[in-house]
Image (cartoon, grey):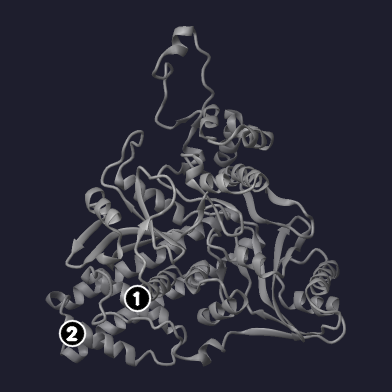
Amino acid sequence: MSEKELISECSQIIYDGFIRYNNYFHRITRRARTRFEQKDWKGHQNDIVDRVDLYEKSVRRIALTLRRTLGSHLTNKILWREIRSYFADRLNQVPDNDFIKTFFNSTTRRIFGTEGLDPDLEFIPSGTSNDLQLIMTLNIRRYPYWVSLKRIFETILDDFSFRVPYDDINLNATRISRKIKAFTNENFSKNVEYLRFEFIDSFFYQAARAYLVGKLILSEGEAPIVIAFKNENRGISVDAIFLEEREVSLIFGYTRSYYFADPNSVIGTVHFLKSMLPKKPIDELYTVLGRLRQGKTERHRTFTQHLSKTEDKFVHAEGETGLVMIVFTLPSYNLVFKVIRDSFGPPKTISRKDVIDKYKLVSKHDRAGRLIDTQEFINLKFPIDRFSDELTNELIQNASDSIRKEDNNLILKRVYVERRVRPLNLFIDECSFEDATRSIIDYGEAIKDLAKTNIFPGDLLLKNFGVTQHNRVIFYDYDEVSLVSDCNFREIPESKSIEDEMQAETWYYVGENDIFPEEFIRFLAMNDELKREFLKYHKDLLTAKYWQRIKNQHLRGDAMLVIPYTSHLSQKKVSRKI
């Protein structure tokens, strides 16, 4: 081929690779409707795994194709600059073209092993949309208000229907209208007028719920509205209605599993959600929609912009020092960074590969509102003078497999990035007894919610759990995570003699996967009053019988559903076997 032909051929290979990836992404996503209608919750979980794996597999396949096509020219940077320019010229006015550019960047980074950003090879995101018209092309269904809330929602429910019928459209419309009236009476003047309702023309599916996402437009402003639907024996019905920004923020939170939604414009959807949730970072909105790589791109862009405008330094994150990870943060930004230590002190017996595998397991699992979303970055580059001397020394001395010093920069070869939350052990020491009690009870609920999704945290120390800004307890330390179904939960055998009990070492046999729930009590590093409150609600967690029952349910294939909200209609926690 001539050079021009080679440039156009490589551009088409990358573009076709993205289209193939994107089409399959949509195909998996669209299956969510059938999964919901057929109550195929296990199939939905399998789709989560398939969709998470899809991007990396697609990039790897295209990189191999380009390697065969370019041969000895594979790493010719002059040629690649021409490919990027040719590629860019053909993306103007293409919907969601930022995704295509990100796919291009992922391909070049795999080929060149790029550290930091390379503006000669990559598209550098600006953070501002190139085409507001594309954002405005998001398909929205609009419903002007005329006479009756109940009547308008009968129409909306009829328009947004499923192949499975509603149990009672009239009753469901009545429930929604009552909730909206109560909300507006409490938050607006008595003269407020309803103008219209706007909904994105796509359901959002997650676990065993479907969500309708939109806005309530009033004469005095607007409010978000999210309606959750469930599918039970009598048919589909409304389970909850969310109208407060705080509630909707939780629905699209960073501890939730990724949504399956198929709007005509992802960028438009993100900006629509951002208008409802102005405090929510753009990167988290991309991520919760399942566009993980775009979420990482936006997170990196916004953080590096913040870094360039500030002067504070990376320091160790608050909390107890970890045996597996070195955890640090930039005080002026709400992220933490975690790199794997070169060696782990006792009692840790896991390997570096084990840790990486644990984080991969969590990335593909139902997080049930209890596992923080963690993004793995490769070859991040930051100025070394932005690290405190104490942190720099520890990273160089204890994490040489994870970092490298190069000139005036630190290269983070593998780093996990997640939202910063308050460690539970610190939180209960500094808050009121009432708040501490609520958190300790929720700590037990978090363990039970995780168990229902087949996750055993491994290390139950309070320092491995955190409290979010919404005072919800979540788990964030994954190096000892395992599946409940892989654990062997045992009762401690009765001793045969006093000499047995007096031995320094365990006198009975302990297998590799053996867990003794009776020993969990020693992880509860709290005062006696809090411990009594915990045991009042969660004493069953300290019994092998509880864990064996949960394990057997997983082994039988019984799906256990955890919906991390309280239904306003029933006022009961939705967390039950289905």
Q: Residue 308 carries which label?
A: 1
Above/below status of 118 relative to 3: above
Residue at the disc numbered 2: 79
Q: What element carries label 2?
A: helix
Graded by Cα atoms within 10 Å as few (under 14), some (14 to 19) or many (20 or more), the crowding at tag 2 reads: some
Q: Is residue 564 rendered to the left or right of residue 27?
A: right
What x and y, as percent, mark residue 403? 25, 57
Instruction: Mark 2 or mark 1: name the one nearer the start of the chain.
Output: 2
In the figure, residue 79 lies in which quadrant? bottom left
Residue 20 visible in the snapshot: yes
Please give left or right for residue 142 compared with residue 340 in the image.
right
Residue 512 position in % (x across, y down): 39, 30
Mark 2–mark 1 Cα distance, whole angstroms, equals 31 Å
Question: Depth check: 337 or 156 in front?
Answer: 337
Q: Which amino acid type corresponds to the residue marked 1 in the rendered image?
A: Ser
Residue 64 in sight here: no
User: Which labelled disc corresponds to residue 500?
Assistant: none
* Disc 1 residue crowd, few under 14, some 14–19, many 20+, Cα 10 Å: few
Residue at the image point whose x is 56% and y is 56% from the top? 468
What x and y, as percent, mark residue 490? 52, 26
The answer to whether mark 2 and mark 1 are in CB contact below 8 A is: no
Query: Residue at position x 48%, y 42% from top?
Result: 483
